[in-house]
Image: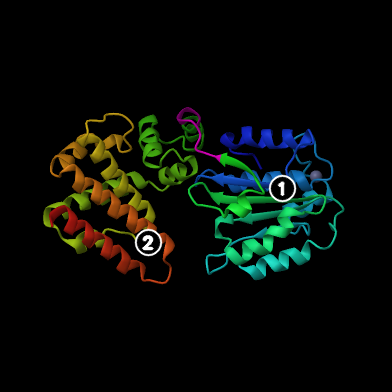
Amino acid sequence: MTLYPWLVPIYQQLTHTFLQGRGHHALLFKTEVGLGTEQLISQFADWLLCQMPQGEKPCHQCKSCLLRQSGNHPDFHLLAPQESKEILIDQVRELNQQLQTFAQQGGNIVVYIQGADKLNEASSNALLKTLEEPHEGVYFLLEAPIQDAILPTIQSRCQTYLITAPKVDSAMQWLAEVCPNTSFETRQIALNICHQRPLICKSFLENDRLPVRKAFLQTFWQFLKTRDVFLLYSAFDKERLFEQLEWLESFFTDSLKAKMGIQHGWINTDLGNAIPIFSQRFHAPLLLEGHRIVQQTQRDLREINAVNQELMLLDGITKLVMTLFG
Ligand SMILES: [Zn+2]
């Protein structure tokens, strides 16, 4: 597996630290989405488990490496949120029990905790002791979104690595390689819309989302004219709500920038004409409030699982119409 280029420096830094004998037994990776950080962690786990690592690389040939490739390594444990969207105490208890025994392959043991922000109070408490007094050769690799808070008791026992979006130049270079049939300009516009996240941008380009976004924003334009809540509601693809709400959010952000005469750092660089027209129609506090409503809708959809998604979206759009035209 070849690492994404923006992950290579951090991988090298990690292995270098460990080769010098300064490796920490609990590492917390706080990451932006769409950067493939799970690839970094997985490869680092391979390296920790490999019986004959070649410098900073796993050998890909030893029994441990082969077990990893088949997805059956007995000393690799994955902990991830269950359907309840949390990591439950029973999962941690089971892990603790497994960690009582020695490594079956005689090497290291690796615990990969995906969504470490989803550890609740009870499951964190159950994890703490293991995290505090680990057995020799047991490594914890925790992953969590950069914007979400981790319980301080957990975070304080880890060494934290921040994984952020690569520089525009290197993201553009990579996109040119993986999406060779797109123009430079298209890639540039898409990367901006995707907030510089290369993997999300790759999927955006491959699925030809640029015209879809254009059509969606045109409907938003229609909605502003007609104030027809259901028109905008029906333009939402229920499978891709977050992507569309993000488009709307950045539309408001850029409109505010236009209002304040800020010319740089726009996300919708291809809408340089439409956005100023939109922004002229509303006072700054209304644009700010519109932006807040879109953000709140995103948050509600992410955090509240029990309630009907459609209803929440409809509620957001209704608030938007009341605010802008109320
Ligand atoms: Zn190996």
Residue visible at 77% across and 67% down? Answer: 97
For image coordinates 24% across by 60% down, the residue present is 317
Up the image or down, 247 lies above or below 240; here it is: above
Colouring convention used in this rendered image of the protein:
rainbow
Q: Report the front residue among 91 and 206.
A: 91
Q: Residue furthest right?
A: 106
Where is 234 relative to 258, above or below?
Answer: below
Is residue 275 found left or right of 158 in the rendered image?
A: left
Label 1: which secondary element: helix
Residue that numbered label 2 is attached to: 300
Q: Position of residue 111 (x, y in %)?
A: 71, 55
Determine if residue 71 is in view: no
Closer to us: mark 1 or mark 2? 2
Above or below, comparing residue 110 to residue 17 in the picture: below
Instruction: Inspect the magenta stretch and tell me whether residue 178 lies in it.
Output: no
* Percent x, y of residue 264: 31, 29
Which quadrant holds the C terminus? bottom left
For the residue pair 281 and 213, the one nearer the viewer reads as 281
Q: Which mark is residue 177?
A: none
Which amino acid lies under the numbered mark 1 shown in the image of this protein? Ala
Q: Quadrant of residue 21?
A: top right
94 vs 69, nearest the viewer: 94
Q: Which mark is residue 45?
A: 1
Stretch of the chain drawn in magenta: 163-170
Residue occupying image coordinates x 42% and y 72%: 306
